[in-house]
Image: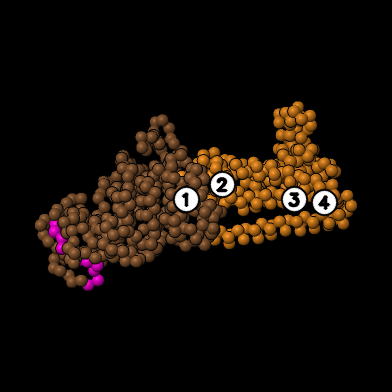
């Protein structure tokens, strides 16, 4: 079986995406929770769009954006000497967009449950807003942080449409597990399709169970 | 939308109670002073000890105001231990010794505990200690006993009094309970529907001196009382030495007036009083009690010079006076 390159590539993509996305989602979710800006519904809607858009639509626009003839794609080409389309970097950028709601929403929910007066207490005790965020809001929202990380990772592992649109089907470079399964079925290699599908199914189930078990325990501890 | 209009100078000495019906803006006033609601609109000028906190020159952020804020609910940090909670502000204000605060609030045995298992009264003591430990220039207490039953309240009240007097910080105390006002406040600022309606002297105060220690508390005699006369021997749950001055608060609902001597009954003491000034438009009458002048709320339709009997069912100690005389 030659499924290992696909598995390795998928895990690499999921790890890189999760790490970058948590760094982006953390300030974004905090801003969405605390701001009174009129822009908030707009930003919130944009953040949630990848959840409802067909992956083909998302992938199509990303493909257009990344193509060497578009300003963004051209800039990338001139800076790095590499095209974004059909590359691992292109996949990471696409995954960042695609999985954004899965990172932002759990964090936003967690931050919203941090009581305002608890943050006020930290402020009156001499903590700057940044200090209060790091020492009070973040520790209290740690379950949301874990949920966001796990869901982002799992969702990135399971992505198909966007990857196919942006990355195509290049073995070892853009061929992730879900595309490997698609290819296997197309070539009537059901044995490989079975192994990979069952693997993804088991993985997804375990991940979700982990999230629920952890959240249940946390809830009990807080109460 | 809520509008709060207040233009007052608050004396930064002792305890100033802010009283008024719910919705009158008590909490909003404290939060505005503390700089916690920075997005409020309108003009706001706060000067604290000749330092401008809010004004044309800008705003001092909440974390630089040195206000020890005790909220209605304790709002402790659930991820920190009791010691971690108390140390949070202390660490940021370079306060090193917390022993006095921990001792005054009897928190020693709780220090290593998490905050999950604390009782309501314990959590409030921790919240108070946390605020005091941050070396505040002024203490804001926003109905810190909300949600406690009357038993817990009477246990917690002396802690507040002791802590406030020991830390020697002025305090603004929001309350609508007359018991708390009687016990703690040196003066009362009345708020109604978003504006200041006036200043009031806390009612029903009597001065006394400690006669003897009685193990759990002390026995005091009202100033002006005869050695064996009424008011000569009142037990108070208080730590004080013989000879020390003690303030006694009489909760409004525990005092009854009658024309004829009512008999001892369940009263702690029955005192003869003379009306010095009948209640006017402001609703406060002044009585002479054993030579002491006492303000009484409520409209008493009794002419000046008339003698009445005052039955007192319950008294509250006021340890503030002991400490402030040091």
Label 2 resides on the chain identified as A
Q: Secondary structure at mark 4?
A: helix
Q: Quadrant of residue A64?
A: top right
**For this rendering, which residue is in front, A151 or A219?**
A219
Q: Which residues are magenta?
A: B265-275
Question: Do residues under tags 2 and 1 come within 8 Å of each other at their CB atoms?
Answer: no
* Residue at point 18%, 71% (across, down): B263
Label 1, on which residue?
Answer: B98
**For this rendering, which residue is in front, B299 or B116?**
B116
Q: Is residue A69 visible?
A: no
Q: Is residue B147 visible?
A: yes
Q: Quadrant of the N terminus of chain B?
A: top left
How far across and how far down the image is residue A107, in percent? 60, 48
Q: Nearer the viewer, mark 1 or mark 4?
A: 1
Q: Determine the main secondary structure of the stretch shown in magenta.
A: strand
Label 3, on which residue?
Answer: A158
How crowded pointer 3 is (Cα within 10 Å; few <14, some 14-19, many 20+) is rated as: some
Instruction: Check chain identity for marks 4 and 3: say if they share one.
Output: yes
Dot placed on the residue nearer the N-terminal end, 4 or 3: 3
Q: CA distance from mark 2 to mark 4?
A: 45 Å
Q: CA distance from mark 1 to mark 4?
A: 64 Å
Q: CA distance from mark 2 to mark 3?
A: 34 Å
Dot placed on the residue nearer the N-terminal end, 2 or 4: 2
Instruction: Check chain identity for marks 2 and 3: say if they share one.
Output: yes
Question: Do residues under tags 4 and 3 come within 8 Å of each other at their CB atoms?
Answer: no
Q: Quadrant of residue B196?
A: top left
Label 4, on which residue?
Answer: A181
How far across and how far down the image is residue B32, in percent? 40, 42
On whether residue B272 falls in the magenta region, the answer is: yes
Instruction: Check chain identity for marks 2 and 1: say if they share one.
Output: no
Label 1 resides on the chain identified as B
């Amino acid at each position: 079986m030659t499924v290992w390159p696909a598995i390795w590539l998928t895990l690499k993509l999921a790890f890189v995406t999760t790490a970058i996305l948590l760094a982006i989602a953390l300030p974004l979710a905090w801003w969405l929770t605390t701001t009174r800006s009129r822009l908030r519904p707009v930003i919130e809607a944009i953040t949630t769009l990848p959840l409802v858009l067909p992956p083909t639509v998302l992938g199509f626009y990303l493909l257009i954006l990344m193509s060497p003839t578009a300003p963004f794609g051209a800039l990338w080409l001139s800076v790095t000497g590499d095209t974004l389309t059909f590359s691992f970097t292109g996949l990471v950028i696409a995954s960042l967009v695609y999985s954004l709601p899965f990172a932002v929403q759990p964090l936003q929910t967690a931050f919203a449950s941090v009581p305002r007066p608890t943050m006020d207490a930290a402020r009156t005790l001499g903590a700057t807003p940044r200090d209060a965020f790091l020492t009070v809001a973040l520790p209290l929202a740690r379950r949301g942080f874990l949920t966001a990380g796990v869901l982002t990772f799992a969702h990135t592992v399971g992505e198909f449409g966007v990857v196919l649109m942006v990355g195509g089907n290049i073995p070892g470079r853009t061929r992730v597990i879900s595309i490997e399964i698609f290819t296997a079925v197309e070539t009537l290699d059901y044995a490989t399709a079975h192994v990979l599908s069952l693997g993804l199914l088991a993985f997804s189930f375990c991940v979700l169970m982990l999230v629920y078990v952890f959240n249940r325990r946390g809830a009990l501890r807080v109460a | 939308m809520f509008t709060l209009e207040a233009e007052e100078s608050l004396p930064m000495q002792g305890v100033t109670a802010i009283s008024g019906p719910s919705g009158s803006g008590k909490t909003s006033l404290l939060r505005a002073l503390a700089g916690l609601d920075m997005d409020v609109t309108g003009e706001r000028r706060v000067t604290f000890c000749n330092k401008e906190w809010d004004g044309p020159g800008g705003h001092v952020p909440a974390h630089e105001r040195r206000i020890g804020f005790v909220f209605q609910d304790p709002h402790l940090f659930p991820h920190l231990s009791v010691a971690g909670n108390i140390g949070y502000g202390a660490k940021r204000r370079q306060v090193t010794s917390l022993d006095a605060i921990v001792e005054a609030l009897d928190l020693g045995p709780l220090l290593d505990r998490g905050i999950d298992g604390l009782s309501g009264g314990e959590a409030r003591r921790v919240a108070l200690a946390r605020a005091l430990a941050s070396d505040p220039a002024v203490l804001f207490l926003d109905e810190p006993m909300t949600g406690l039953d009357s038993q817990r309240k009477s246990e917690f009240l002396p802690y507040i009094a002791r802590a406030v007097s020991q830390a020697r910080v002025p305090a603004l105390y929001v309350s609508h309970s007359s018991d708390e006002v009687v016990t703690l406040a040196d003066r009362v600022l009345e708020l109604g529907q978003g504006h200041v309606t006036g200043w009031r002297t806390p009612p029903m105060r009597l001065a006394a001196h400690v006669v003897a220690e009685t193990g759990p508390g002390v026995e005091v005699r009202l100033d002006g009382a005869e050695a064996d006369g009424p008011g000569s021997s009142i037990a108070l749950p208080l730590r004080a030495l013989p000879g020390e001055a003690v303030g006694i608060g009489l909760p409004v609902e525990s005092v009854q007036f009658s024309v004829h001597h009512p008999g001892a009954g369940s009263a702690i003491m029955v005192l003869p009083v003379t009306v010095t000034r009948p209640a006017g438009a402001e609703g406060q009458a002044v009585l002479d009690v054993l030579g002491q002048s006492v303000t009484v709320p409520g409209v008493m339709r009794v002419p000046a010079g008339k003698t009445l009997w005052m039955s007192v069912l319950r008294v509250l100690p006021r340890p503030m006076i002991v400490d402030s005389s040091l």
